[in-house]
Amino acid sequence: MVSMTLAKRLRPKTYSIALYLVGFVLLAQLVALISVFYFRRVVNIDLSAPPLQPINPPVVAVTDTPSQPVAPAPIQPVTPPDRITPVVPNPGRLAVNSVQDVAQRVKALNEESARFQLQGDMRLAALALFKAESLDPKDTVTLVNLARLSALEKDNEKARVYWQRVVDLGPGIGEAYTQAREQLEVIDARNPRPADNTAVTTFSSSAAPIPAMTFPTVSRPAANTVQRALYVDRIEKNVATPTASGWGNDVTLRVVIGSGTVPGGGNIQPGKVDIKLYFYDQQTGGAIVPSKATLRVNFLGTRQTWANGQQETLLANYQLSPEQARLYNQKYYGYMLRIYYDGKLQDEKAEPENLLKFFPAAK
């Protein structure tokens, strides 16, 4: 009798537990089903910047003297890995492949300069660019890189000279011409020149004036945007006034993204959109590293559909406090943006542009 009484008491509790378990399973399945539809309508944004990779294998210095037999060098103690210094070529013998085409040599020297910048050696970076300039004084890429390097070294007068040389090449060089004009405007606004200085930058009356805006435009749509599902229509950047010490940055990007032709037809599916926005900082030694800043990134509006050809705007704010800057010994360097749709690269932008070379994109 006792056992029968216990069985009767246990059955209701067991039954209740079973009902709870069934209800929990059903609820979990319902949440999973709803999440599938939710994530199909949400754009994925990746802010985890990877470290930059060299674009070429390590460069070996070239000497003009033929190799001679030498006595074996004495064995030296091994340097701990965290104290190894990168081996760079002798500044008097920049290592460039012996090619007869001047354009290829100039391109190789520009790539070598970018590699030296990543290693933190601005002197060798400048030497490579000066060599490229001597080979072709009118090469647009070389002049732009010289202007950027001068600005990086806080030499605004030298940067002004190189940007002016780019402008002197005329509108036929494309986007570099417009960029040079904008940079000259920025330099002149921050560092007005004396009224009696004859070297003041001027533009021809036929050139369209740069429109005044809160955010200076630094990127423009390419000609084949309609052939892509998504493209960057423009990027507007606003930089807040830095602290008195020069450290600490507040940078805001306004990225306007347009839509073109979706593969297979139909509308943009937000769940297939992947945006990779990476920020990089520069250490006092010159090395470029992933940023330690606080990032706030979100779209304007509740839903992104790109329906009926409308554009969507992504707002990104980078904040590196003076305390963070001192702690990590870093300051703002630039950003790299890539937009993918259904796993395929649609568009990419960077400032400075050489960031794209050190982190190849999956096409």
Image (tube, helix red, strand yellow):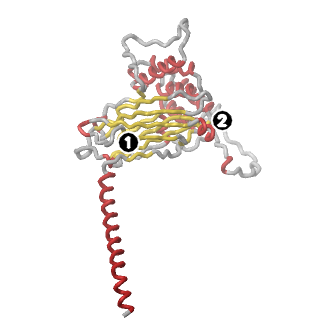
Tag 1 near tag 2, CB within 8 Å: no
- Residue 90, disc: 2
Q: Considering depth in this image, is 159 or 96 the residue closer to the camera? A: 159
Looking at the image, can residue 165 be seen? no
- Residue 270, placed above or below residue 248: below
- Residue 339, disc: 1
226 left or right, relative to 295 = left
Residue 292 % position (x, y): 55, 42
Q: Quadrant of residue 347?
A: top left
242 left or right, relative to 303 = right
Task: Tell me which residue sits at (30%, 56%) in the image.
Answer: 34
Looking at the image, can residue 271 be seen? yes
In terms of secondary structure, where does tag 2 sit? loop
Q: Quadrant of residue 97?
A: top right
Mark pair 1, 2: CA separation: 40 Å
Residue 8 % position (x, y): 34, 85
The N terminus is located in which quarter? bottom left
Task: Tell me which residue sits at (72%, 52%) in the image.
Answer: 78
Residue 10 % position (x, y): 37, 82
Task: Tell me which residue sits at (44%, 19%) in the image.
Answer: 169
Callout 1: 10 Å neighbours few (<14), some, many (20+)? many
Type of the residue with mark 1? Ile
- Residue 15, placed above or below residue 102: below
In terms of secondary structure, where does tag 1 sit? strand
Residue 334 % position (x, y): 50, 35
Q: Considering depth in this image, is 288 or 318 the residue closer to the camera? A: 318
Residue farthest to the top?
A: 196
The C terminus is located in which quarter? top left
